[in-house]
């Protein structure tokens, strides 16, 4: 039975899953690089949208705050992976702003400032909660909701793949990285007895399996060169 496993074994399994999650997340963070190479090469963002990176940045910042010792206990891997993710997302957003037209640039700058402003409100507001347990629940619910919304974002792409019977807009390595990272942090949350981590990542794991199943089912039908979309699902 699960409860008969020694505490030391739980700790080892938790730490191993956390380290694996950080490694797999790195693959997810670098997956948009080919798209941004194209943007830099063409000196234009073309018809791509930067909104997924705004959402991803907000998610990373909220989850980083959740992982800090001021909010939760023994969640350093969550803090490290999301702080690294925040750096990647800010870099992508800056590059996008540099090569976007004036209208997109102003919009993205406004959204970026809104994200930082919202995070300042969340941090300041949660610090006003004196009871640490209540603070943990408050930030944990925000983190969980943010993660679920991020993992749900590929549903549009999944629907597009089914309709077009093509994997052109669902890159394999992005789907694989999402699945591996979600699975690692699902296990991490289970071994750390943290529902705010294992519930959303369990959903991410299920969606990752669905994406991979669809990819292998429809990959033979993708006959044209696939263009990398600016879509990121992240933990």
Image: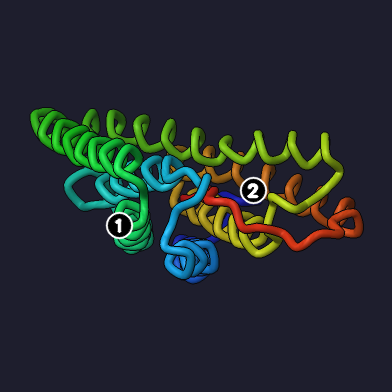
Q: Closest to the observer: 227 or 125? A: 227
Residue pictured at 72% horizontal, 39% vertical = 158
Spatial CA distance of label 2 from label 1 is 35 Å
Residue 181 visible in this rendered orientation of the protein: yes
SS of the residue at dot 2? helix
Q: Are marks 2 and 1 in contact (CB under 8 Å)?
A: no
Residue pictured at 43% horizontal, 56% vertical = 44
Residue 98 numbered mark, or none? 1
Q: Closest to the observer: 42 or 13? A: 42
State the image coordinates of residue 201 (x, y, percent, origin top left): 54, 45
Q: Residue 124 is drawn in which quadrant?
A: top left
Q: Is residue 159 above or below residue 33?
A: above
State the image coordinates of residue 36 (x, y, percent, origin top left): 46, 63
Q: Earlier in the sequence, mark 2 or mark 1?
A: 1
Residue 82 visible in this rendered orientation of the protein: no
State the image coordinates of residue 228 (x, y, percent, origin top left): 61, 58
Q: Closest to the observer: 201 or 212? A: 212
Neighbourhood count class around disc 2 (C-alpha, 10 Å): few under 14, some 14–19, many 20 upward: many
Q: Is residue 172 above or below residue 142?
A: below
Residue pictured at 37% horizontal, 37% vertical = 143
> Mark 2 sits on what residue?
205
Left or right of 21: which side holds 64?
Answer: left
Neighbourhood count class around disc 1 (C-alpha, 10 Å): few under 14, some 14–19, many 20 upward: some
Q: Select label 2 or label 1 by which is in front.
A: 1
Task: Specify how the rendered protein is coloured.
Answer: rainbow
Left or right of 234: which side holds 83?
Answer: left
Q: Is residue 43 above or below residue 211?
A: below
């Amino acid at each position: 039975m699960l409860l008969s496993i020694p505490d030391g074994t739980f700790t080892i399994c938790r730490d191993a899953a956390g380290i694996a999650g950080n490694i797999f997340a790195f693959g997810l963070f670098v997956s948009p690089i080919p798209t941004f190479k194209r943007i830099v090469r063409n000196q234009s963002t073309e018809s791509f949208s930067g909104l997924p990176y705004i959402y991803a940045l907000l998610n990373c910042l909220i989850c980083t705050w959740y992982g800090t010792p001021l909010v939760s206990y023994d969640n350093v891997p969550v803090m490290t992976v999301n702080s690294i993710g925040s750096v990647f997302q800010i870099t992508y957003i800056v590059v996008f702003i540099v090569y976007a037209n004036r209208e997109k640039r102003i919009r993205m700058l406004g959204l970026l400032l809104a994200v930082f402003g919202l995070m300042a409100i969340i941090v300041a507001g949660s610090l006003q909660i004196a009871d640490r347990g209540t603070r943990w629940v408050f930030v944990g619910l925000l983190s969980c909701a943010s993660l679920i919304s991020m993992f749900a974002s590929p549903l549009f792409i999944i629907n597009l793949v089914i309709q077009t019977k093509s994997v052109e807009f669902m890159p394999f390595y992005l789907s694989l990285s999402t699945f591996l990272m979600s699975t690692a942090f699902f296990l991490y949350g289970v071994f750390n007895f943290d529902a705010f981590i294992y519930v959303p990542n369990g959903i991410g794991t299920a969606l990752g399996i669905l994406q991979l199943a669809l990819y292998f089912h429809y990959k033979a039908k993708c006959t044209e060169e696939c263009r990398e979309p600016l879509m990121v699902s992240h933990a």
